[in-house]
C-alpha cells in the first residue's frame, strides 16, 4: 500500500510537488496523469526513496520513505523514465547483475526471469548485446528488471512510451497480469487509453498539485457531466425536432443520428424512447462511452478557467 | 554481516571491471603500457646505463633503475583517473544511474564498489608492467633495486592510484557532466604531476626514507578524500544537478545566509554568529594551539641542524637599534602600524588560499612556519647564553598575546574547512560546504581577527619597542 500526506518537494525556489495526498491500496492500480513537468517523476522518485521530501510524509509498503529508505527500495520495483541499460552486457548478464544486488543467487534470478522474458517476447534476444536493442526492447527489459525481486509495489514511469503498438499491447497485458491482491501499482502515463485500460483509479497532477483523485468512472461522471445517448433513425431527420422534456437536451445532430444529454437516465430514458418511437422510425438507442481523454481535458480546462478567474 | 554488505559492493565492482575489459579504448592503452612501454623503458635504461658507466657516473645509473620502475608503474594507473572520473557522472549521462540507485544498496556500497572497480584493473596492469620491466632488467643483466626499495615503489604506486581515484570519484559525484568532470580533473592531474616530479628528485637524490613519508602523507590524503566523498555522496544531488553554469546569485545567497545568519544588528551578529562559531571550532583551535607549540619546538630543535651566526641578529647593539626604532615608530604614527597589520593579514590570506585548495591541511603552514622561526631564534639566543625570557617578554609577549591567539583563531577557521568537508552532511553539496566555510572564515576574520590584528600591530609599533628597551640590560 502507498500513502502520502502533504508530500512536498521543493528544489531551491521551485515547488515540484505540492502537498499531495494519495492512498493506493494493495491490489489497486493508480494512474498518475499529467502534462510534462507536472511532478510525476519527482513523485515517483520520492516514493522510491531517491529524493527526500521537503515536507510531508509517504509510506510505501508500511515503510517511511525518509527514514527507512533501504527497506522501501527492497519493496519497490521501479521502471524509470530512462531505461538506463548497460550496452555491453546481454539481457541475462544485466538481469543477473540486478538480481544479485537484491541478494538473489544467479540460478534464482535465471529461474525468475525465464517466464517473464518469454511473456514479453524477449526470450530469443537474451544473448544479444543491450546496445543493439530497439527502444521498445529496452523498455521491456527494464520492466523485467523492475520485477526481478518480486516487489509488492511497482512504480512505472511511462512504461510504453517508446514502444510500437504491438509491443505496447504486450507490455500492457503484462502489467495487467502483474496486478494482484498483494501488489500496488502506480503508473505514470500520458496515454489515457492505457490508463483507462489498466487502472482502477486516476490522479491528475498539474503544476505539482493533485487536482483530481477518483475512480475512473467517477472522473468521467464528474468532469464530463450527464451521460450522452445516441439515437439512430431509419432516415435522416429533417426540419424542427420535437419538443423535449426538461432535463433532456439535444447536443448534436449528424444525419440520421441524434445525440441527447440526459440528466437522469433511469427516469428520463423510457420517456425519451417512447417519444422518439411515437414520432420517428427509431432503430437503436445506446449510451455513448465517455472517453477518459475528455475527462482529462475537462479537468485541465477547469483548472485553467479557475486560474484565469482568479 | 559486514562481509555480506561488502559482497554487494563487489557485485558492482565485478560488473564494472567486466565492462572495462570489454572496452577496447581501455584495453589497448593498458596493454601498451603493460607490455610495450616496459620494454621501451628497459631499452632506454640499458642505453643510459651504458652511457653513464662509460664516464664512471655509475650512481646516475643506479638511481635511474628504480626511478624508471616507478614511472613504468605510474603510467598504467593514470588510466584509473579516466575510469574514475566518469564512474558516477558517466552513468548519470547514460541514464543508468537511477536503476542502480533504486536498489537497496547503501550509499557507501555503491561508492566503494565503483571506487574499487576504478582502481583494480589499472593497478593490476601497473604490477604486470613493473614485472615485465624487472624481467627485462634481469635478461639484460642489470641489477635489480633492493627489495626494500621495490616495496617502497609498489606502496607508492598503490597509494597514488588510491589518491587519484578517490579524488576523481569525488569529482565524478559532484560534476554535472563528463565534460565538467574532465575539466575538473586538472585539480588532480596538476598536484599529481608535481608529486611525481618531487618523487623523482627524491629518487635521484637517493634519500629513499623520504619516500615512506610520501606514502604516509598520501595515505592521510586518501583517507580524507574517501571520507569527503562518502560524506557528501547524495543520490538526490547526483540525479538532480543538471546545470553547470556559475550561479553568483545562489553563491551570494549561501554566503550571506552563513555570514549574517539571522542577526538583526552588529551586537546581535556577534552574539548569534561570531561567538557561537568560535565555540563551534574550539577543537580546531585546540589542535592549532598544539601545532603552535609543536612548531615552536621543531623550530628550536633545528638550530643545531641549520647553524646561523648570532651576530647577524644584531643582539650586541640591540639597545641602539631599539632607540632608533622608538624614534621612528613614535606614538600616533600609523604608517608602520599599517605595514605590520597588512603583513600579518597577507600571511593569513595566503594561509586561507592554501587551506581552500588543500582541504584545510596546508592552511596551517604559514602559522607553523612563523612559530617555528620564533622557536629557532629563541633557541639561537639561549644557545649563546642570552636571556631568552627577556627577549620573549620584551619582544613577543606585549603584542603576541593578542596577535598569536588571533592567528590561531584564523588558522583554526581555515583548518575547519577540511573538518566541515569531511563531516557527513548529504543535505549540502561540496560547493555549499565550501561557501559555508568561506563565510564562516570571513565572519571570524571580520568580527575578531582583523580588529585583534590591528590592535596587536598598534601595540607592536607603539609599545613593544619601548618595553623591550626598558627590559634590556
Image: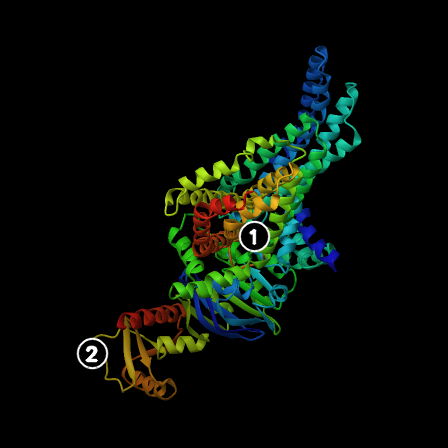
Identity of the residue drawn at 49% across and 65% down: A43
Q: Judging from the image, what secondary structure is the residue with disc 1 in?
A: helix
* Residue B272 x %, y %: 46, 65
Q: Position of residue B80 (x, y in %)?
A: 62, 39
Q: Which quadrant holds residue B102?
A: bottom right
Q: Which mark is residue A240?
A: 2
In the image, B116 versus B69, the foreground residue is: B69
Q: Are marks 2 and 1 on the same chain?
A: no
Could you tell me which chain the residue with mark 1 belongs to? B
Instruction: Looking at the picture, tell me which residue is in the foreground, B179 or A275.
Output: B179
**2 vs 1, front mark:** 1
- Looking at the picture, the colour scheme in use is rainbow
Q: Residue pushed farthest top?
A: B54
Relative to B445, residue B149 above or below: above
Which quadrant would the N terminus of chain A be assigned to in this image? Answer: bottom right
Residue A126, image x, y percentages: 64, 49
Tag on residue B97?
Answer: 1
Location of residue A293 with respect to B442 vertically, above or below: below
Amino acid at each position: 500500500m502507498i500513502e502520502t500526506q502533504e508530500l512536498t518537494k521543493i528544489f531551491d525556489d521551485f515547488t515540484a510537488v505540492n502537498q499531495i495526498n494519495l492512498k493506493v491500496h494493495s491490489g489497486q492500480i493508480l494512474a498518475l496523469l499529467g502534462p510534462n513537468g507536472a511532478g510525476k517523476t519527482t513523485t515517483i522518485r520520492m516514493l522510491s526513496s531517491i529524493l527526500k521530501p521537503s515536507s510531508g510524509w509517504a509510506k510505501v509498503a508500511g515503510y517511511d520513505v525518509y527514514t527507512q529508505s533501504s527497506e522501501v527500495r527492497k519493496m519497490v520495483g521501479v521502471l524509470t523514465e530512462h531505461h538506463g541499460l548497460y550496452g555491453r552486457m546481454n539481457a541475462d548478464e544485466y538481469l543477473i547483475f540486478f538480481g544479485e544486488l537484491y541478494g538473489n543467487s544467479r540460478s534464482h534470478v535465471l529461474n525468475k526471469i525465464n517466464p517473464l522474458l518469454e511473456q514479453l517476447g524477449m526470450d530469443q534476444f537474451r544473448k544479444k548485446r543491450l546496445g543493439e536493442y530497439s527502444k521498445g526492447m529496452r523498455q521491456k527489459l527494464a520492466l523485467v528488471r523492475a520485477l526481478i525481486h518480486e516487489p509488492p509495489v511497482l512504480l512505472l514511469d511511462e512504461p510504453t512510451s517508446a514502444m510500437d503498438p504491438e509491443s505496447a499491447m504486450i507490455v500492457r497485458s503484462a502489467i495487467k497480469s502483474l496486478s494482484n491482491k498483494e501488489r500496488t501499482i502506480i503508473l505514470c502515463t500520458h496515454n489515457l487509453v492505457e490508463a483507462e485500460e489498466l487502472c482502477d483509479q486516476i490522479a491528475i497532477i498539474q503544476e505539482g498539485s493533485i487536482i483530481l483523485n477518483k475512480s475512473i468512472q467517477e472522473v468521467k461522471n464528474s468532469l464530463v457531466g450527464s451521460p450522452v445517448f445516441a439515437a439512430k433513425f431509419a432516415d435522416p431527420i429533417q426540419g424542427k425536432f420535437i419538443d423535449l422534456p426538461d432535463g433532456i437536451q439535444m447536443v448534436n445532430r449528424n444525419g440520421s443520428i441524434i445525440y441527447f444529454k440526459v440528466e437522469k437516465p433511469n427516469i428520463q430514458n423510457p420517456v425519451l424512447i417512447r417519444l422518439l418511437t411515437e414520432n420517428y422510425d427509431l432503430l437503436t438507442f445506446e449510451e455513448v462511452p465517455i472517453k477518459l481523454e475528455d475527462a482529462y481535458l475537462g479537468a485541465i480546462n477547469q483548472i485553467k478557467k479557475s486560474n484565469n478567474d482568479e | 554481516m559486514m562481509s555480506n554488505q561488502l559482497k554487494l559492493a563487489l557485485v558492482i565492482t565485478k560488473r564494472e571491471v567486466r565492462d572495462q575489459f570489454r572496452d577496447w579504448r581501455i584495453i589497448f592503452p593498458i596493454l601498451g603500457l603493460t607490455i610495450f612501454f616496459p620494454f621501451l623503458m628497459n631499452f632506454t635504461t640499458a642505453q643510459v646505463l651504458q652511457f653513464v658507466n662509460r664516464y664512471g657516473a655509475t650512481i646516475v645509473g643506479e638511481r635511474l633503475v628504480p626511478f624508471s620502475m616507478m614511472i613504468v608503474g605510474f603510467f598504467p594507473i593514470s588510466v584509473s583517473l579516466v575510469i574514475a572520473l566518469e564512474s558516477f557522472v558517466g552513468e548519470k549521462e547514460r541514464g543508468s544511474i537511477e536503476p542502480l540507485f533504486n536498489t537497496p544498496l547503501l550509499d557507501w556500497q555503491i561508492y566503494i564498489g565503483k571506487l574499487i572497480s576504478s582502481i583494480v584493473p589499472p593497478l593490476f596492469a601497473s604490477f604486470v608492467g613493473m614485472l615485465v620491466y624487472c624481467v627485462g632488467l634481469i635478461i639484460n643483466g642489470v641489477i635489480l633495486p633492493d627489495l626494500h626499495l621495490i616495496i617502497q615503489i609498489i606502496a607508492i604506486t598503490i597509494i597514488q592510484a588510491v589518491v587519484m581515484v578517490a579524488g576523481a570519484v569525488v569529482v565524478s559525484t559532484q560534476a554535472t557532466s563528463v565534460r565538467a568532470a574532465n575539466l575538473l580533473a586538472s585539480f588532480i592531474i596538476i598536484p599529481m604531476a608535481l608529486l611525481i616530479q618531487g618523487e623523482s628528485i627524491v629518487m635521484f637524490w637517493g634519500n629513499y626514507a623520504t619516500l615512506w613519508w610520501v606514502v604516509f602523507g598520501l595515505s592521510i590524503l586518501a583517507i580524507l578524500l574517501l571520507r569527503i566523498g562518502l560524506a557528501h555522496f547524495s543520490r538526490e544531488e547526483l540525479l538532480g544537478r543538471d546545470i553547470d553554469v556559475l550561479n553568483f546569485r545562489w553563491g551570494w545567497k549561501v554566503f550571506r545566509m552563513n555570514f549574517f545568519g539571522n542577526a538583526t544588528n552588529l551586537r546581535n551578529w556577534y552574539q548569534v554568529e561570531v561567538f557561537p562559531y568560535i565555540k563551534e571550532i574550539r577543537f580546531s583551535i585546540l589542535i592549532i594551539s598544539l601545532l603552535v607549540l609543536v612548531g615552536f619546538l621543531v623550530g628550536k630543535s633545528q638550530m643545531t641542524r641549520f647553524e646561523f651566526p648570532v651576530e647577524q641578529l644584531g643582539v650586541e647593539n640591540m639597545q641602539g637599534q631599539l632607540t632608533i626604532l622608538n624614534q621612528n615608530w613614535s606614538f600616533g604614527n600609523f604608517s608602520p602600524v599599517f605595514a605590520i597589520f597588512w603583513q600579518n593579514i597577507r600571511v593569513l590570506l595566503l594561509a586561507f588560499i592554501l587551506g581552500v585548495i588543500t582541504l584545510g591541511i596546508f592552511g596551517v603552514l604559514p602559522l607553523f612556519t612563523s612559530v617555528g622561526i620564533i622557536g629557532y631564534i629563541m633557541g639561537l639566543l639561549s644557545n649563546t647564553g642570552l636571556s631568552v625570557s627577556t627577549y620573549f617578554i620584551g619582544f613577543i609577549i606585549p603584542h603576541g598575546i593578542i596577535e598569536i591567539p588571533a592567528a590561531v583563531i584564523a588558522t583554526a577557521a581555515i583548518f575547519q574547512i577540511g573538518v566541515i568537508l569531511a563531516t557527513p552532511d548529504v543535505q549540502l553539496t561540496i560547493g555549499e560546504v565550501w561557501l559555508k566555510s568561506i563565510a564562516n572564515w570571513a565572519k571570524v576574520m571580520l568580527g575578531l581577527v582583523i580588529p585583534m590584528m590591528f590592535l596587536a600591530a598598534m601595540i607592536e609599533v607603539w609599545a613593544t619597542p619601548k618595553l623591550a628597551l626598558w627590559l634590556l640590560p
